[in-house]
Amino acid sequence: MPPTALEDLISLMDEDVDLVVGSHNEVRIGMHPHLEKPNIIEGREIPERFREYDSVVWWPWGKLFRAGIILDNNLSYDTNITFGEDHIFNLLYGKYIKGKVVVTDKIVYNYHYIRGGLCSKYYPDMNALQKYVYIEIENFFGGHGSTPYPIRQRYSGAYLKGLVDYYAAWLKFGDAVQKIKESFDMYSDITDEDTLKEFFTSEEYAYIEKGDFAAFTKLYIKNNPRKTTVRKYRRFVRRALERGQKVFLKRK
């Protein structure tokens, strides 16, 4: 945490504020600021402005929580999973916010990307983990039937498409095809035709309908090189640079 982090967070925590969300530096080989857009969300507005709230609560650090909300409602982390549990906690916390959520562009955290850490390793069951988080989003609204359709469509489609990106970028082609098919099967109960047509091209959708996931994956990679091929290449280069950096530091 930067020296003034707590001071900056506390300066924004007033009696009518229940959560302060700060900005952070992404520390890889260099340091790059990730600045949030300053914003204020009233607690009663969170369901209607859910996407704004959700976009800034994917992680637990860089925030100031009101302890009373956590203690009075016995809130704790879901220990059934090891990926996304922080996101789920923040969704749960949001259900009890009565005051304001204040988002600031002040940097209050330096996030170091550690090779081999929980957020940088490969998860074979990422599709199940993401669906687990999606179900908790529905639970935020009181379950599947109470969740507005635009929210269901947006998140189920985005999570499914993200899984295609994820497996295509991490795995060899044949393995990626198998995991992508598995993901579509797993998400069949929370996605519909309109959602698939919204997130995939008409040609991609045609292959999905046929169940030809080899052709679908090949076309998707061709249509989305930055999210698949380039992402895989960048990870390879980053690993090489990090290995070189470690050797250099040892020699020094």
Image: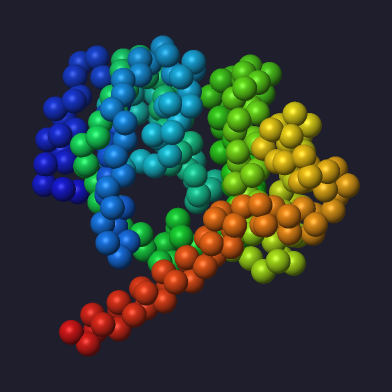
Q: Residue at x 56, y 20 (%)?
A: 141
Instruction: Tell me which residue sits at (34%, 80%) in the image.
Output: 244
**Of 75 and 19, the residue lying toward us:** 19
Q: Give the residue furthest to the top.
A: 44
User: In the depicted view, which residue is nearer to us: 33 or 18?
Assistant: 33
Residue drawn 86% across and 49% down? 211
| Quadrant location of the C terminus in the rendered image | bottom left
Q: Position of residue 47 (x, y in %)?
A: 49, 17
Q: Is residue 244 visible?
A: yes
Given residues 31 and 74, the one toward you in this image is 31
Which residue lies at the image location 65% right of the left edge and 43% below the top edge?
A: 160
Quadrant of res 146: top right
Q: Is residue 141 left or right of residue 144?
A: left
| Left or right of 86 on screen, residue 38 | left
Residue 45: horizontal and vertical position, in percent? 42, 14
Q: How many marks?
A: 0
Choose top left, top right, bottom left or bottom right for residue 228. Answer: bottom right
